[in-house]
Image (tube, helix red, strand yellow):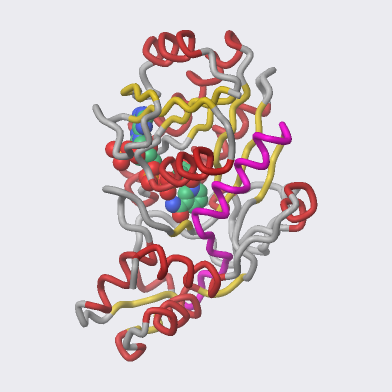
Amino acid sequence: MKILVTGSNGLLGQSITSIFTRESDFDIILTSAEEKSFLSYGHHYEMLDITKKDDVKRITDYYSPDVVINCAAYTIVDKCETERELSWKINVDGVKNLIIAARRNKSKIIHYSSDYVFDGKNGPYTEESVPNPISFYGREKLASENALITSDINFAIIRTVVLYGIGVGIKQNFVLWFIDKLRNNEPVNIVTDQISNVTNIDDLAFGTLKIAEKDLRGIYNIAGEDILSRYEFALKICDVFKLNKDLVRPVITATLNQPAPRPLKSGLTTFKMQSELGFKPMDSLEGLRLLKTQLGY
Ligand SMILES: NC(=O)c1ccc[n+]([C@@H]2O[C@H](COP(=O)([O-])OP(=O)(O)OC[C@H]3O[C@@H](n4cnc5c(N)ncnc54)[C@H](OP(=O)(O)O)[C@@H]3O)[C@@H](O)[C@H]2O)c1
């Protein structure tokens, strides 16, 4: 099977590349917005900005992949509120470019969405729950889902939540940011009222592998096993990484004045992934312990 990964230099793109390389016999083509790949597995690499329709056409026509795994996205949620045009271009129009190319090449698209498509009033959410985004990023993610759902191509949409893991030259995720702050003895404000699962990136990549191997279609939640507040998660990070809990100050979301509203009582159920993909995701402690090993601490 020939797989083309977009956004391969991001957190998820790197984990996908590593797990697909290790676990199976795929022909892998990496693409990302940068001139060079951050990884050195020896796969073909092409610079590809998914907002450039002609480049998407040229590269996907050339490789004619069986599956396009779209890890490219504009992921800074607060900046999506102010950079609306740019973020829409990447998160929605970029996906539409991939759909047009996939239709021509008869490729499947595996795309990622978020619990931010929900309002956070009554999570955790199943694959059938009715979306009602409260942020611009959430609206973009929902629009990208709808572009796939209303297309006539083979697709899978994976909804996920609070990703953490390691990678080369990646943006900081919550866990890496938190460890960094506490190791430098800096106090941090952590919210007690945002409740959801947290997801080790390797589980998300492994679940994607299963979806590709089994050619599953439609919407799948892939997320960590337990649901907890961000504050409870922070205390678990302190336990695993032996950090000073006195530096962690509990606050509520409203005090942070963030540009993008957050879904509070959120999270994604994992029954469908457990039964159809056939694996149980890590809980937050297991995921953090794996991360600790990967970081070499
Ligand atoms: N992170 C989370 O907690 C979370 C939660 C739920 C869902 N998700 C979804 O999961 C997916 C993967 O997220 P992630 O955490 O891996 O994000 P990430 O680390 O920000 O990776 C996204 C990658 O896409 C690249 N990119 C941006 N614009 C591009 C373009 N026009 N063409 C090609 N590549 C482009 C980025 O490059 P630059 O770095 O150079 O911009 C980056 O390498 C996304 O769809 C995200 O919405 C993430």
Picture quarter with ligand 1: top left
Pick the front one: 290 or 236 = 290
Q: Position of residue 35 (x, y in %)?
A: 24, 27
Quarter of the picture containing the N terminus is top right
In this picture, residue 222 sits left or right of residue 69:
right
Q: Position of residue 116 (x, y in %)?
A: 54, 51
- Span highlighted in magenta in the image: 192-217
Outermost residue toward the bottom in this view: 246
| Placement of 81 over or under 43, stated as above or below | below
Residue 183, picture quadrant? bottom left
- Based on the picture, tell me whether residue 104 belongs to the magenta stretch: no
- The residue shown at (63%, 52%) is 222
Pick the front one: 186 or 179 = 179
Residue 235, picture quadrant? bottom left
Quarter of the picture containing the C terminus is bottom left
In this picture, residue 165 sits left or right of residue 103:
left
Q: How many marks?
A: 0
Pick the front one: 141 or 82 = 141
- The residue shown at (63%, 70%) is 226
| Any part of residue 106 in sight | yes
Residue 188, picture quadrant? bottom left
Q: Position of residue 127 (x, y in %)?
A: 72, 48
| Any part of residue 136 in sight | no
- Based on the picture, tell me whether residue 200 belongs to the magenta stretch: yes
| Placement of 203 over or under 291, stated as above or below | above
